[in-house]
């Protein structure tokens, strides 16, 4: 079968012929890959910044944002059947008995760092025609979400962040003044970045009830502004508004959801958090020259205002379930805007085009099968 592989030692990326997988366990399912989303991680892997092949292989099949259709199931698979649409999780647990996180199915909190990740670290990914996977890592998706379900995995970044946000804010009285209101109904959230992770995160925060604004820098932001405008979220352009301007326009900031990987912007915004606020880092910046940061001001504000900073990576199974539910809500409330998050679709033989950054675009998708 065809697959898109990166050869780190040869510094090559190409479509290859890879052995078609077969079931080796009664608890596995074989799926036909339909769509694979392209993200910044994939672009960094094909530029050889990281990405590790499985042991014994000189190449890594890329792709971790997927939508597939079940074509075969083992005898002990009980929750899936042939024809079901599924999304697959990414991270697999480490083998160490002492890692309580992995032993409890929370490999997103792995203590050892010896986890593997499909399409990223020591395990082949999903940009291929067929995949065999254990049932526990497959999540059914309603058929009506067929055209947008490839967005589930990037949405899980926001879902895990929301899970952590609600847990940590139990530390303080965070209710709204009005009776029977969610704390989100009287809180302001800022999303940094208008890429797919940022836009989907903004949608999730909006559905939860936050007053949301997006602050981003983009050479061609008309399409992103149109999507955000359709769901009632203001877009604040970083080219024309400083972080101080943004903070004045948005009002007291209760939550920042960072989805850019731009540390200079993030730490500048960090200075403008409101009392008892939470700043959530999800981006991973590249290794660049040091930037000047007023650490005294940041530390003073965090102490005097009970502020909290947390990092969030990968996602547990419940985040995938939440993402599927939220995606359904997005499709009902903002169908056109949600479809517009997917900028273009490319067949597998045009994968090189899909992997290129599209000016003004949001999300490229490789359509492996129709």
Image (cartoon, grey):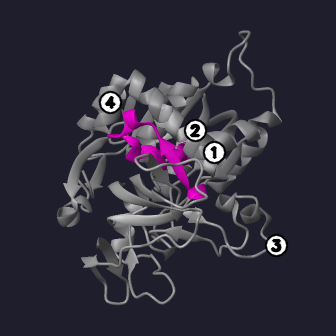
10 Å crowding of disc 3: few (<14), some (14-19), many (20+): few
Tell me what residue is drawn at x 47 percent, y 56 percent.
Answer: 261
In the picture, the disc for residue 337 is 4
**Residue at coordinates 77% horizontally, 69% vertically from top-left?**
99
| Magenta-highlighted residues | 135-158
Question: Which of disc 4 and disc 2 is earlier in sequence?
Answer: 2
Tag 3 residue:
98
Please identify the quarter of the rendering in which residue 179 is found.
top right
- Regarding mark 3 in the picture, which secondary structure is present there? loop
Of circles 2 and 4, the one toward us is 2
Instruction: Provide the residue designation for mark 2.
Output: 322
Locate residue 20: give its quadrant.
Answer: bottom left
**Above or below, comparing residue 10 to residue 313 in the picture:** below
Position in image of residue 117 (x %, y %): 53, 68
Q: Are marks 2 and 1 in contact (CB under 8 Å)?
A: yes
Residue at the extreme front: 75
Which residue is disc 1 drawn over?
A: 318
The kind of secondary structure element at disc 2 is helix
First along the sequence among labels 4 and 1: 1
Locate residue 337, reporting x and y percent: 32, 30
Marks 3 and 1, how far apart at CA: 23 Å
Q: Is residue 76 above or below residue 343?
A: below
Indicate which disc, 3 or 1, sits on the residue closer to the N terminus. Answer: 3
Q: Percent position (x, y) of residue 207? A: 52, 26
Question: Does the magenta stretch mainly form a helix, a strand or a loop?
Answer: helix
Mark nearer the N terminus (2 vs 3): 3
Q: Mark 4 falls on what kind of element? A: helix
Q: Depth check: give the residue in front, 206 or 69.
A: 69
Disc 1 secondary structure class? helix
């Amino acid at each position: 079968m065809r697959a898109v592989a990166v050869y780190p030692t040869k510094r090559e990326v190409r479509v290859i012929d890879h052995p078609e997988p077969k079931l080796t366990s009664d608890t596995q399912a074989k799926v036909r890959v339909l769509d694979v989303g392209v993200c910044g991680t994939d672009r960094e892997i094909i530029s050889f910044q990281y990405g590790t092949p499985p042991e014994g292989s000189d190449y890594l099949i890329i792709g971790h944002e997927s939508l597939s259709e079940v074509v075969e199931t083992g005898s002990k698979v009980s929750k899936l059947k042939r024809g079901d649409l599924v999304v697959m999780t990414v991270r697999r647990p480490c083998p160490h008995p002492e890692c309580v996180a992995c032993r409890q199915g929370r490999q997103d909190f792995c203590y050892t760092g010896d986890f593997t990740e499909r399409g990223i670290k020591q395990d082949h990914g999903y940009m291929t025609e067929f995949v065999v996977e254990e049932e526990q890592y497959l999540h059914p998706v309603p058929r009506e979400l067929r055209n947008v379900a490839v967005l589930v995995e990037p949405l899980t970044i926001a879902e895990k962040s929301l899970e952590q946000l609600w847990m940590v804010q139990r530390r303080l009285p965070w209710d709204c003044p009005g009776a029977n209101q969610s704390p989100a109904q009287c809180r302001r959230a800022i999303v940094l970045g208008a890429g797919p992770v940022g836009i989907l995160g903004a949608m999730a925060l909006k559905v939860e009830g936050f007053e949301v604004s997006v602050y981003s820098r983009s050479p061609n932001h008309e399409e992103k502004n149109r999507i955000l405008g359709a769901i009632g979220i203001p877009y604040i352009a970083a080219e024309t508004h400083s972080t101080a301007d943004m903070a004045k326009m948005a009002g007291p900031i209760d939550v920042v959801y960072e989805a850019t990987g731009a540390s200079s912007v993030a730490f500048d915004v960090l200075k403008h958090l409101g009392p008892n606020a939470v700043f959530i880092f999800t981006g991973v910046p590249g290794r660049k020259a040091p930037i000047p940061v007023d650490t005294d001001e940041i530390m003073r504000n965090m102490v005097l205002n009970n502020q909290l900073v947390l990092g969030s990576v990968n996602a547990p199974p419940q985040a995938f379930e939440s993402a599927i539910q939220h995606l359904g809500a997005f499709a009902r409330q903002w169908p056109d805007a949600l479809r517009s998050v997917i900028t273009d679709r490319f067949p597998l033989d045009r994968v090189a085009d899909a992997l290129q950054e599209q000016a003004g675009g949001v999300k490229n998708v490789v359509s492996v099968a129709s």
